[in-house]
Image: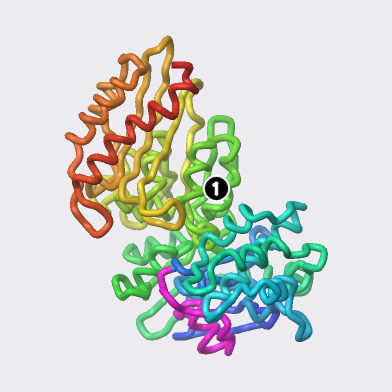
Amino acid sequence: MPIGCDRNVLVFFVNGVRHEVGGRGAFLSLARYLREQASLPGTKIVCAEGDCGACTVLVSRLVSGKWTPLTTVNSCISPLYLFDSCMVVTVEGLSEQSHLSEIQDKMLDHHGAQCGYCTPGIVCSLAHLAETSQAKGIRIDRKRAQNYLTGNLCRCTGYDPILKAAENIDLMQWRPLGLRYLTDERTDYCQYLASQTVLVTAGNRRAWLPTQVGQALAIKSASPHIRLVAGATDLGVLHNKGRQYLDEVLVLNRISELSEVRRVDDGVIIGATASLSEVEDVVESSHFELARLLRVFASPQIKHQGTLVGNLVNASPIADTIPALLVMEARLGIKSAAGSRWVELKHFYQDYKKFDLRPGEVVTEVFIPNLPEGAVARFYKASMRKDLDISSVTFAGVLQVKGGRIVSAKIALGGVGPIVRRLPNVEKELTGKEFSENSLVRAGDLAIQSVHPIDDVRASANYRRLVAKNFFKKYFVETAVELNQ
């Protein structure tokens, strides 16, 4: 093994059983490993895109010596090397001593399955619902169950029996999975594993799993072309579909320092591997509109694994968070073996998938400032459905209004060109104007003259222009009362 590498195999637990995997097996998706190598076929593979939820399992990770709560992930798009030193619980692990769990019993009682192919994933999502509801002392109602099942599709049963099963779960009969699987002995062992740097190889494939930022920067400096992976919620799809292969990767999710989310006096700092779910929880009180946007960002399974920094650096023209962070004037913390620097997000994007990022550099965190006093933010996405869908057009606006006039304006649009764009000409047009519907409508007219959308499978260029224009009016209608206009 290379100097500085402690082992060349992955070690993790599945339903309390220790697994050790090296070579080619380490590059399988978790779902394929469970089905093909671990003889646990309850986990299904259907879409291989993280959309249908049939592949749902529960995962807990050690962060700074403590287990995270068991949460759901899409195992079909998750490379196995993301789960070193983790605990994975599959549908087979929910029952105990040959007795079905409370959730499985309720699914039977309320006829919550027909063909049964989607059922294991649904049951795992309901297990997550039971775990968190019991831990927080929250009663399970239909709305709460719907939120937890957002990432699970069922083509034949219909959702009413499944929701009835969820509503009738007796939390007094649910034995927490954490008590069963996250034992002190396994905690100590996994803490030892989590302290080790791992390099798994198979032919021309390499997966580095460092434990310190300095190690990651040294690896990136030596191999500037190496692919960085934290959650792989987009890269895993591209890999499955043969668009991009994850053959040489630097895995960041075992570096505890990068998972931190902390409030400071003037904003919040979010580490590169902090999940979208963690971000949503933290910004609920300080950046409410961002939290509201994250609630419809994706399914729970995606948000538990995907990261905010990953969404920013992936730089899709229709990324949901980029417009919002642009108008909030976020900054990226960037490090390399040579030093560190901060880059304003509005200067980071230079062209399609082209950034202000030098060879050997890694984005390690993002700083989101608090909104100025009196500023009102609105972030919108247009998609074919409310939940679990990719945007066609995105809008973000932050206006400050005093005495009935706009004293500051920040506007960004996505889905209307090769990159998400701030619109300085529109901002200039709005500044100093009366805060009125007419002012916002005129700004919308100017905005659509400044963008160049295309026709694609999600929307036509004309549709995108019309939606972008209408978002300006929507902003006025929603904020006029708030701003006492």
**Place of residue 407 in the rendered image (x, y in percent of width and height, measured from the top left):** 37, 16
**Residue depicted at x 37% and y 65%:** 227
Residue nearest the observer in this picture, 192 or 466: 466
Magenta-drawn segment:
26-49
Residue at far right of view = 172
Label 1, residues with CA under 10 Å away: few <14, some 14-19, many ≥20? many
Which residue is tagged 1? 279
**Residue depicted at x 78% and y 67%:** 174
Q: Can you see residue 66? A: no
In-image side of 176 versus 127 (left or right): right
Displayed quadrant of residue 388: bottom left
In-image side of 484 versus 442 (left or right): right
Is 121 included in the stretch rendered in magenta? no
Callout 1: helix, strand or loop?
Answer: helix
**Place of residue 48 in the rendered image (x, y in percent of width and height, measured from the top left):** 42, 74
Is 47 included in the stretch rendered in magenta? yes
The C terminus lies in quadrant: top left
Q: Can you see residue 22? A: yes
Residue 165 to residue 434: above or below: below
Q: How is the image coloured?
A: rainbow
**Place of residue 329 in the rendered image (x, y in percent of width and height, measured from the top left):** 40, 34
**Residue depicted at x 61% and y 68%:** 161
